[in-house]
Amino acid sequence: MHEVIICEKPKSAEKIAQALSSNVKKMKYGRKVNYWEINEKDKRITIISAVGHLYSLTPKNQKEKVYFDLKWVPSYETQKNLNYVKDYVYAIKKLGKGADKYIHACDYDIEGTLIGFNALKYACGENSIDITSRMKFSTLTKKDLIDAYNNQIELDINQVNGGIARHIVDFYFGVNISKALTTAVRKAKYRYLQLSAGRVQTPTLAILVGREKEIQKFVPEPYWLIKALLENKYEKNKEEDIIADHVEGKIFDPERAEKIFESCQGADSTVDKVKLSETIRKPPIPFNLGGLQSEAHTVFGFSPKKTQTIAQNLYTEGYTSYPRTSSQKLPESLEFKKIFKQLSANEVFKKHIDSLPQKTKPNEGKKIDAAHPAIHPTGIIPKKLDSDSAKIYELIVYRFISVFAENSKLETLRVDLSVDKEKFFFKRKRVSYMGWLSHYPFRKIEEDFFPAFKKGDNIKVNEILSEEKETKPPARYNEASLIKELEKRELGTKATRADIIAKLYDRKYISGKKIEVNQLGMNIISNLQEYCKNLTSEELTRDLEKKLEGIMADKITKDKVIEDAKKEVLTILDDIDKNNLKIGEGLYNAYQESRIVGKCTCGGNLVVRFSPKTKSSFVGCSNYPDCNVIYSLPKGAEVLKSKCEKCGLPNISFGRGKSRKRACLDSKCGVDHSKINEVEVVGQCPDCGNNLLKRHGRYGEFVGCSGFPKCKFTSSLEDLEDKLNKKED
DNA sequence: GCAAGGTC
């Protein structure tokens, strides 16, 4: 009897193999594909894995105008970068042929069920489905896996159909409407523009457009802040005044502001109340993918996609756990002690680990994941990592350590004062107990000076300030905050969100780190809002979710769902087709506008163009051939929003990684531009002598030592001078 | 090529 177990990914195949028998042989098919064999008296079990989806949808006939007739083909046939999939398909075909029984052991969710189903149907043969049963497990722990093996259930064909419907509906909407937009431009302008729309990317773009419009229509409102500059009575050598704010905060009525300002003139202040309080700050929670992406963005400025790629590599190398998890939990079965012991081979990690409290229970978050725990180090210490990978690795290790550490404590001083009849206050904060903060060097440590004001004190007021300010428009999203927004709205999945955002950049719909929507992006949304409003809101996702649930509950057939989607898409395509010229012209003009990077001296626009001859981009004048101003662009160059200080032309950035440079578009301009990634050195570390660097932490800028993690010196920018002087004394 | 979803 030969039994074949099909798993979703190599890692879970390994876990399942190890769980089922201690006498399991690891084998290799070809050079890359691992599989496992268990030989029992009357049974041979082969455990093999897919690598996610092995098959993708493609039109049966590429030449059709619209694609509704689809088929499944091996994914490496439609996407060249998926070549590694080939080995796995071949392995399953060879090793899974003619078995007596098949066990579907992919993740128990809609996609996982389809991954296993397609692998069986197309690689092992259609008949294999009839002799297939299903393992259902929610973690990859030994106990769960053995239970699942001993209590196999029937393959849920409704769940399979849900998966198929999801793929087809997304293809119908995404590919056909994308094609229709591209076609509209071709028909109107005889130009090829790669445009796209989809169930997730379009609502994502719409969120950004919404924010863009809020910013555009925002009317700043003036307000006033009244401040009292108090003499620093208890520490005269500190020359700076203490700034106290009026309790009313933002004052929008200019008369009221004027009145306060006038009545405070010439008066001194009396301390009404001094309140010292202590708050506890719990340790941070373990990383899930979104959490890691967000933290790496704030601490290192990494894009979510970059972080994801690095985390995937660290996982493949065996240094950290599976990254595509939504879990913020660290179950005890991970054997923390073992991980700590292994990490302790590193001297620096050891110091942190040794000073952890004896009881070791992690502080956890609320989010869970069916298949994987939160991201954590495995204990295997990397031999050599490039600097960016090392950063992510250390972030993961220190986060892991700090979730086991003690609470930190923050002391807050609040002083309330009266100036004449007006009430003012100021606050100071300092960390009074480091706790987990000493194991997590990516946060700013508050260390304000606490002036020893006492109730009843008379304090000299050096000056009363009335500062006029303006309310600010809502902030733009960055990649990390956008991912959070998508998580909140349940758009996309943890594995795809970073890619979706990257795609919007790629299409030139959006630009900048603080994300701005370009004309093209605005135009895409306004067109789609007119011709298929559904696609621009998250309604389509909500609707699809409901339908898939219906399929899985056997209340509606997949064919009905697919048929409905087809009808809807056909209506939309018809609408777009009728308005082809208008839509195409609008999109193309918006695209042109997006490419304008500056003004030419002749009055024309400077535009990024592409030369098919040299296969490279350059910047030329829109008045060509009357004006033949031209600037060449280095390979991979990006035209920036910032302008050259000397000549006013836009700056460009070019080069890769650390050597990426900023320069004027005009290479002959000759202004000295510093490297973009150059960090600002603000002094020498008093502890170890290395450079002190300006860094960006969660709570703003601070100073850290380049010798980190060996050297732990940190300081706020304000206190740096003080700290350096103290050491000299 | 176009989507979104798995995965290395």
Image: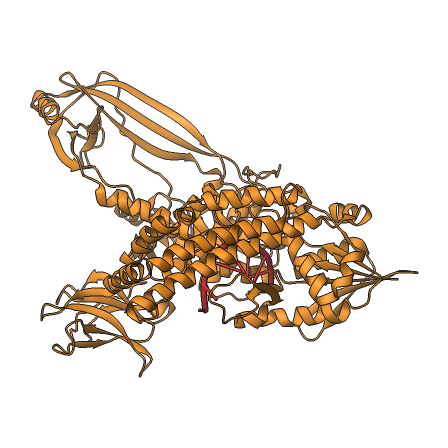
Chain colours: A orange, B red
Q: Is residue A606 visible?
A: yes
Seen in the image, is A536 located left or right of residue A567? left
Seen in the image, is A424 located left or right of residue A129? left
Task: Give coordinates of residue A580: x percent, y percent.
Answer: 33, 61
Rendering quarter of residue A457: top left
**In the displayed structure, would residue A431 be above or below residue A309?**
above
Between A35 and A208, the one nearer to me in the picture = A208
Among all residues in the image, which is located at the extreme right? A41
Seen in the image, is A467 located left or right of residue A699? left
Task: Give coordinates of residue A597: x percent, y percent.
Answer: 21, 65
Rendering quarter of residue A329: top right
Q: Which residue is drawn at 63% across and 63% down?
A: A51
Seen in the image, is A298 located left or right of residue A340? left
Q: Residue at x 32, y 80 (%)?
A: A612
Question: Which quadrant would the N terminus of chain A be assigned to in this image?
Answer: bottom right
Task: Give coordinates of residue A111: x percent, y percent.
Answer: 61, 53
Q: Can residue A718 be seen in this view?
A: no
Rendering quarter of residue A261: top left
Between A207 and A679, the one nearer to me in the picture = A207
Q: Residue at x 68, y 56 (%)?
A: A12
Count of labels shown?
Answer: 0
Task: Give coordinates of residue A108: x percent, y percent.
Answer: 67, 48
**In the displayed structure, would residue A711 be above or below residue A430?**
below
